[in-house]
Amino acid sequence: MQWLDKIPLTALVIAALVLALAPFTPEPHLWQKLKMLADGTLTRPIDIFDLVMHASLPLLLIVKLLRRARVGKKPRPPV
C-alpha cells in the first residue's frame, strides 16, 4: 500500500470532502444514498454506483488515516 502513502493527506482530505458533500444542495448524495441503504430502498444499479462513487474517497481517507496511526506506533529500527 505504498501508493496510498504517496497521496498527500491535504489533497485527499479536500477531495474526500468535496466528493462526499457534492452536490451541496438540496442534500449531499452520499447522505441520501446512506439513508436509502438504511431504509432498504437502495436497489437501482445507478444508486448503488452513486453510493460507491461518493463513498470511495472518504473510505480511502479513513484507510490512510488508520494506516498512518498504525505505522506511527511501530518502533523504529536503531540507526
Image (spheres, rainbow, N blue to C red):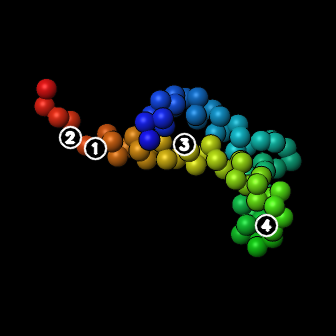
N-term-proximal mark, 3 vs 4: 4
Disc nearer the start of the sequence (1/3): 3
Of pointers 2 and 3, the one earlier in the residue sequence: 3
**Position in image of residue 29 (x %, y %):** 78, 50
Q: Position of residue 17 (x, y in %)?
A: 66, 39
Q: Amino acid at mark 1?
A: Lys
**In 3D space, how far apart are the residues under numbered discs 2 and 1 (Cα atoms)?**
6 Å
* Above-or-below relation of 68 to 47: above
Other-residue count near label 4 (Cα within 10 Å), few / some / many at <14 / 14–19 / ≥20: some
Where's the N terminus, which quadrant? top left
Q: Disc 4, disc 2: CB below 8 Å?
A: no
- Residue to which mark 3 is pinned: 61
Closer to the camera, 4 or 28?
4
Which residue does the numbered mark 1 point to in the structure image?
A: 73
Considering every residue shown, the one lying at the far bottom of the view is: 40
**Residue that mark 4 sits on:** 42
Amino acid type, label 2: Pro
